[in-house]
Image (cartoon, rainbow, N blue to C red):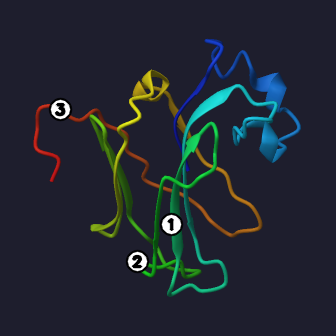
Amino acid sequence: FFFLFRDRTGRTLYESRMDRLDGNYPRYHGREDADAELTGYIFTHLANGEPDNPRYRLRDVPPFDPVIAESRGKGGARQGVRYKVTILKQGERIRYLVNGETILDHMDTGKNPLHASGLIGFRTFQSHISWDNLLVTALDPDSPSD
């Protein structure tokens, strides 16, 4: 899941879409040596061959590595099972929940001003995944984050 993605050069993602036309991973994953001009967060939620021991990661793009938050063994990643995923960002706090259970809880103290706003997106690779009932809302920055 791509979260708060934007073009570092100030172009809209629509304006820079031709840069990513081939769909190659280096175009948007943001390694320092990549062709991408994009910045944001990437969440991964995958079985990695172990559907009862899924792996979750949060990465800051760029530089993509190292992983800034990681968790294993909570939730699940079983084929044919519907999961309710919630992503919350209030101030510096970013949380990833599956079926109401907090999986990742990260304080992003890097204060990257480019991560204050942006777009969301989805990417899959060799999977049978679908999304439905997407809801995006602004949260009151003064409300409790629990």
Q: For residue 63, what is the image quadrant? A: top right
Vertical placement of residue 72 versus 105, above or below? below
Observer-nearest residue: 120 or 44? Answer: 44
In what quadrant of the picture does the C terminus appear? bottom left
In the displayed structure image, the side of residue 132 where residue 89 appears, left or right: left
Query: What residue is drawn where x is 50% and y is 66%?
Result: 56
Real-space CA distance between mark 1 and mark 2, rounded to the nearest whole angstrom: 10 Å
Q: Residue at x 38, y 65 (%)?
A: 84
Where is residue 98? Give x, y as percent. 37, 67
In the image, residue 35 above or below residue 146: above
Task: Say which element carries label 2.
Answer: loop
Determine crowd level at label 1: few under 14, some 14-19, many 20+ residues with C-alpha closer than 10 A: many
Alpha carbons under labels 3 and 1: distance apart = 27 Å
Amino acid at dot 3: Asp
Q: Position of residue 124 (x, y in %)?
A: 69, 58
Q: Which amino acid lies under the numbered mark 2 shown in the image of this protein?
A: Gly
Residue 75: numbered disc: 2
Q: Is residue 32 left or right of residue 107?
A: right
Q: Amino acid at mark 1?
A: Tyr
- Residues at discs 2 and 3 in contact (Cβ within 8 Å): no
Q: Which mark is residue 110?
A: none
Mark earlier in primary sequence (3, 1): 1
Q: Secondary structure at mark 1?
A: strand
Q: How many marks?
A: 3
Residue at horizontal 68%, vertical 70%?
128
Q: Are marks 1 and 2 in contact (CB under 8 Å)?
A: yes
Q: Residues within 10 Å of mark 3 (few under 14, many from 20)?
A: few
SS of the residue under disc 3:
loop
According to the picture, the residue beneath numbered tag 3 turns out to be 140
Distance from disc 2 to disc 3, alpha carbons, whole Å, reads 27 Å
Image coordinates for residue 87, horizontal then vertical, percent: 37, 51
Quickly name the residue at label 1. 56
